[in-house]
Image (spheres, grey):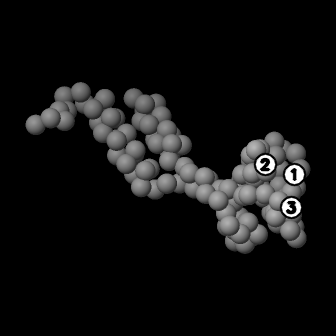
Amino acid sequence: MRITMLAVGVLATLACTTQTVVPEPRSYIATKHPKSIWVVREDETTRVDSPEMHGDTIVGTVDGKPFSVRARNVQVNVSEIDWPLTEVLAGAGALVVLVLVNPHVSLAH
């Protein structure tokens, strides 16, 4: 049963993230210190870990290897939690767990 509850919690969190475009990568990276960002160039999206700004260049790692790209040549996205959706899914997950734990619970009265 614990595995079911853990799975519901993990799935709810994973399902509730959204990609948001960062209009000013330099200030965002400097103030928020994100663990990772997504760099979009042409038709390719790359996850960059430990991003930093060095001048006008985004540097970090991709799969453990050094990565750099000029910020003006790319779009930068970040993953953010969609809190309203998270709350809805967490509530629904809690209801499912309640019914699984106590099958005598009736949702219809």
Q: CA distance from mark 2 to mark 1?
A: 17 Å
Location of the C terminus by quadrant is: top left
The answer to whether 27 appears left or right of 107 in the picture is right
Does residue 48 appear in this view? no
| Residue 48 falls left or right of residue 90 | right
Three-letter code for the amino acid on which mark 3 is drawn: Arg
Q: CA distance from mark 1 to mark 3?
A: 11 Å
The three-letter code of the residue at mark 2 reads Glu
Q: For marks 3 and 2, give the CA distance.
A: 14 Å
Mark 1 is on which residue type?
Answer: Phe
Using the rendered view, name the quadrant where residue 63 is placed. top right
Residue count near mark 3 (Cα–Cα under 10 Å), binned few <14, some 14–19, many ≥20: few
Mark 3 or 2, which is nearer the eye? 2
Look at the numbered disc 2 and give the secondary structure of its residue: loop
Q: Quadrant of residue 43?
A: top right
108 w.r.t. 25: above or below: above
Picture disc at residue 82: none
Res 70 label: 3
Q: Position of residue 52 (x, y in %)?
A: 80, 63
Question: Circle 1 is placed at which residue position?
Answer: 67
Indicate whether 31 appears above or below 8.
Answer: below
Residue 42's disc is 2
